[in-house]
Amino acid sequence: MTPKHLSIAIAGLALAALLAVGLFQLASKSGAPTRLEKLTAAQVQAGLVGSPAPLAALHAQAGELLDGGARALRARLAVLHGYPVVINKWASWCQPCRAEFGAFQHASVLQGRAVAFIGIDSGDSSRSAATSFLRSFPMSYPSYYDRSGHLGEAITDSSFIPVTVFYDSHGKEYIHQGPYQSLAKLEHDVERYALDHA
């Protein structure tokens, strides 16, 4: 290859790289979903070492699908009194829910020593589908199984899925309808609504 052809090839590669970076930035600004590297169960647990006892109890049930409905969830929230809480309503058949799980996986590890994350698996007709999905996507927190969808609707004031509810340490509530397209947007809302950092 002549020096001239080599220069043209290098220029072409540089242009392709700039175009790829530009498209990534454009996708991020437009709110298009961005792919996050899935964390392993070991990485999730390692990121939460040293959590306070009520949050560590959540982490000990990481990825579990819990029974007990509204009574069990209310009891858990009573134990978490004084802590910020993020509740995400999802279902294994819901593609927007699946798309935002990467953001919740990362945010719950980054913020999980200060904020309680809880899931509600709402409207899944089969526990096995939800359990299978949770096995394939390690989370740092459990979800409450809500086959009828009544618990999820009562907590989120909506039949829509996904919905995320934020409670600050004083119990002030904020409800976000729809999926989170990026980790940055979810982290922003955790900071603003759960941690009350305006």
Image (cartoon, rainbow, N blue to C red):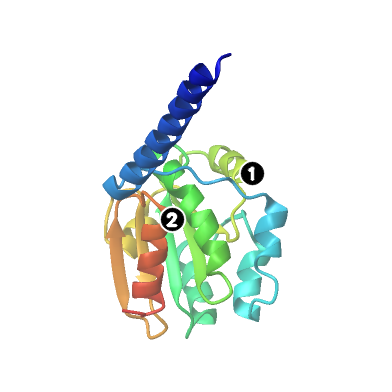
- Closest to the observer, 26 or 132: 26
Q: Looking at the image, is 118 positioned above or below residue 170? A: above
The residue closer to the viewer here, 163 or 112, is 112
Answer with the quarter of the image where residue 15 lies.
top left
* Residue 170, placed above or below residue 51: below
- Considering only vertical position in the picture, is 24 above or below 76? above
The three-letter amino acid code for the residue at tag 1 is Arg
Q: Nearer the viewer, mark 1 or mark 2?
A: 2
Viewer-proximal residue among 89 and 139: 139
- Identify which amino acid the numbered label 2 is placed on: Leu
- Going by the picture, which residue comes out furthest to the front? 3
Of labels 1 and 2, earlier in sequence is 1
Judging from the image, what secondary structure is the residue with disc 1 in? helix
Q: Which mark is residue 40?
A: none
Res 43 → quadrant: bottom right
Position of residue 123 measured from the top left corner of the image (x, y, whole percent) = 40, 45
**Residue under numbered circle 1:** 135
Is residue 32 among what the camera can see?
A: no
Q: Label 2: few (<14), some or many (≥20) within 10 Å?
A: many
Residue shown at the point (61%, 78%) measured from the top left: 54
Residue 9 is situated, as x and y percent measured from the top left of the image, at 49, 22
Q: To which residue does mark 2 refer?
A: 183
Task: Note whether residue 116 is visible.
Answer: yes
Separation of residues labelled 1 and 2 (CA atoms) = 21 Å
Label 1 packing within 10 angstroms: few (<14), some (14-19), many (20+)? few
Q: Residue at x 38, y 34 (%)?
A: 19
How far across and down, in percent of the image, does residue 85 sit? 45, 72
- Asked if residue 60 lies left or right of residue 27, the reply is right
